[in-house]
Image (cartoon, rainbow, N blue to C red):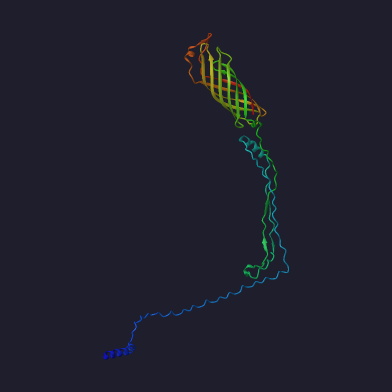
Amino acid sequence: MTTRLAAIAVTLLAVPRIASAQIIYDAPTPQVQVAPPAPPVYAPQPPQVYAPPPPRAYAPPPPYYVPRPYYVPRPIYVPQAPHVYIRERVRWHFRRAAAAILGALPPPPPPVIVQAPQPYYYVPQAPLPPPLAAPSCCYRPPCCAVAAQPQPQVYYAPGPVVLVRPLQKPAEWSSRIGLGVRGTGQVVNDSWNNLGIGGEFLYRMSPRWTLELAAEYQKNTSGPIDRMDIPATVGFRLHIGRPNWVVSPYLVAALGFDYATQDLRITRDEAYYFDGQVGGGLEFRIGQHLAITADARFDGKKRVDEPAQAVLATTSVDGKRVHALADEYGGQFRLGVAVYF
């Protein structure tokens, strides 16, 4: 027992010695190689540029005597004769008269050329001195005299001013629509002689062309039986003279239809004709609202239907020989008067 206690005591006393005698080894630290720092680079300083100061320009003193400059006179412009414009449509039949009037005018005077004077010299004035900051190349002192060569001036002498009066339309052109009446005498190849009266509508389309719409009532004056004709035609009149003539000749052509009938006592013959007319006449103009016409026309008629059997069987009436209406031709003479509005 005592021995045990002594061993424990010795152990406790030896613990501090043992603790101090221990060597503790730490874990080895990994070595990291660090690159050496880069050597410093020294950039040379930019060279200093010294700009020279701008040259100073010195203006010369003004001359004691500045010659008086010469001034080139301005050219003198002489206005030409004014042009006369006629803003009106000229018909082709009036152009010859207008050309005759213009041809009678005197020719324009020739142009006058003034010779240029001799060249003269002058010394320009010294310009104002430039500012000191401006470069010296911008200043140009007067050097020598400058020659000025004037140009020759050409002008036209004023010619006579001629005012051409515009051609006026004839008085009858202001009234174009006309209404008229006319009487007709007709001679036919088969011994028919007719007299008639009718009306017409006229329209002046231009100074030379006139439209004609007409209808008539005609009655025979001779023959064994009674006959009646009602023609209706449309035609055109062409005035071959100047439109301002008081007596104007014209040509006429018309086409239309004619209804004719004759009384045969026991039957009636009715015929339809295709009617064509061509001729000429005169128109006498009294002012612009009244016109008298007279013309002669060749008239041809072509029957377009066939006569009835009863008409063909009838050969005489009251002991006088008769026949059915057939193709006809003859002459017509007309006298009419028209009022235009």
Left or right: residue 101 compared with residue 187: right
**Is 155 placed above or below 91 here?**
below
Query: Which one is in front, 156 or 251?
Result: 251
Residue 233 point in image, percent of width and height: 56, 24
Residue 295 point in image, percent of width and height: 61, 23
Question: Please, which residue is most extreme toward the front here?
Answer: 1
At horizontal 56% and vertical 18% (from top left) the residue drawn is 229
Query: Which one is in front, 105 or 275?
Result: 275
Question: Please, which residue is most extreme toward the top here?
Answer: 319
At horizontal 67% and vertical 63% (from top left) the residue drawn is 146
Left or right: residue 143 compared with residue 19: right
For the image, the number of numbered tags is 0
Tell me the quarter of the image containing the N terminus: bottom left
Residue 266 point in image, percent of width and height: 51, 11
**Is 92 placed above or below 108 here?**
above
Looking at the rendering, which quadrant does residue 15 occupy?
A: bottom left
Residue 280 point in image, percent of width and height: 59, 25
Observer able to see residue 239: no
**Is 57 placed above or below 193 here?**
below
Tell me the quarter of the image containing the C terminus: top right
Observer able to see residue 219: yes
Query: Which one is in front, 21 or 292?
Result: 21
